[in-house]
Amino acid sequence: MKNTRPLLILSLMPWAWAPAHAVSDPWLPPDAVVIQAVASSPTWQAQIRQSLADAARADQHAHIEQPWTTLASYGQRRNRAPAIDPQEARTREWSVGLEKQTRWPGQTRAAEQWAQEAQALKDAQAQQAWQQQLQELLDLHQAWLTAALTEKHWLTQRDLAQQQVDAIRKRQKMGDATRVDLLQVEAALAQAQSKQLESAELTRQAARKLQSRYPTWPLTLPAETSLQPPQSNALPAAESIEQLSLSHPDVKVAQARLRLSQAQLNEARARTQPAPTVGVNWAHDNSGRERTWTVTLSLPLGSTYQQLDRQALAYDSEAAAAQSQQAQRDVQTLLQAQHSALQVGTQQWTLEYQATTQLQAVVQSLSKGMALGETPLNEVLNTQRLATQQSIELIQRYFQLKALEWRWLAGTQQAWMQP
């Protein structure tokens, strides 16, 4: 079996990682930054060290060989010797030897195959862990973006409320507005200031949580933060989902477990062939007057334990086959749900975006009319509250949709994945 540890060591180097498909998204840093953030996280570093340990154990299993065993003995023999030769009544005896349990070539090949499949499973599990780390990073980034854009929206609302307060005060000085009107716009300003402070604290908390898990992640908003209808160009035809599911890490892990269970069963069957134990001994008997060379050969007999072990492994292999089929079905169902959610969500968000944009235009028009004393204040404030609520919901749904798009790319296009 080829030693895979050098490949794992190379994976520790940042330049050894590259995305399978480049992702161009203004809400994400470059692909290299995303990959480096995951690769340098403490959780992934622990995973890499565990993979190195697993590779060593796989190599160890591939080289299971019984060591040579040394044998030594010493004793004295007492005989009923004639009285005329009393020296014959006691003689010294000693012997030394070596023995070793052998393996048939088929057993060696079965052990090597087991080790290869065990390493393949660890590689698949490493890719699965990488995707989980990547998903956690993107989810935390999505939470920070939502909080940051919400804070920015409340800053705009605060400035707008301040402009309304200034306009009402100006009208009050001219005798065109009442004290109640001023109290209403001041209350709206205070609420906007409170919401802005609240959203700023949520943004700081999201940033701290993100950087505590991924210290190298940049907390920088793009230059253009206006929301635009998302593009679903990454979506393939629904008929290709079955093929896409085969490359999903969860399916690869299930398939690797199936191959490993089959390799374990083959190795157990290979072990049923009795492997002989060979040895050689050199004996020194009768006080050196007799010297003997002996070659030994022994064969173990089968047992019920071995039969039950093979039976259990056969059941394990059947269970792994069923689990592999179920894993593929589950992933196909998941991808179909994501595919449908992206399509429907994009259409819904586009309609909500159009409605919110129109409502914001109405708010601006009413605000101008209020400043001139042409629009009732209550109508302006009510419309403004409705527009604010819709805008915040639009921000939240937009980044939920982006998170779903990133999850789709990571699971089907192998974006930001280990090669």
Image: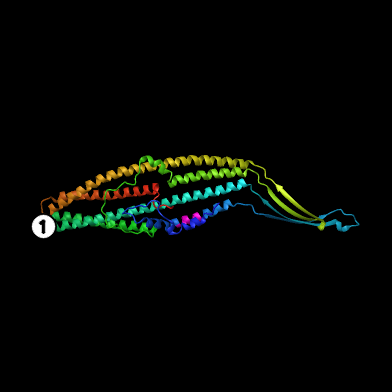
Q: Where is residue 340 in the image (x, y as percent from the top left)?
A: 34, 42
Outermost residue toward the left in this view: 175
Bin the neighbour count of mark 1 within 10 Å (Cα to Cα): few under 14, some 14-19, many 20 and up: some
User: How many numbered marks, from 0 up?
Assistant: 1
In the displayed structure image, the side of residue 187 where residue 107 appears, left or right: right
Find the magenta span and give its range: 45-52
Residue 100 at x, y percent in the picture: 67, 52
Lateral position of residue 376 relative to residue 401, left or right = left
Image-quadrant location for residue 301: top right
**Foreground of the two, 130 or 92:** 130
Q: Main secondary structure of the magenta part?
A: helix
In the image, 5: left or right of 335?
Answer: right
Q: Nearer the viewer, residue 137 or 77?
A: 137
Q: Give the amino acid type for the residue marked by disc 1 in the picture.
A: Gln
Work out whether residue 150 or residue 257 is closer to the camera in this orientation and state it.
257
- Identify which residue is drawn at 50% across, 40% down: 321
The answer to whether residue 327 is magenta is no
Q: Which x, y percent locates residue 389?
A: 24, 49
Among the 4 quarters of the image, the one containing residue 174 = bottom left
Asked if residue 175 is positioned above or below residue 390 in the image, the reply reads: below
Q: Which residue in the protein does label 1 denote?
A: 172
Q: Residue 173, can we see it?
A: yes
Most foreground residue, 138 or 416: 416
**Left or right of 294: which side holds 182?**
left
Q: Which residue is painted at 15% across and 53% down in the image? A: 367
Asked whether residue 49 is in view, the answer is no
Colour mapping used in the image: rainbow
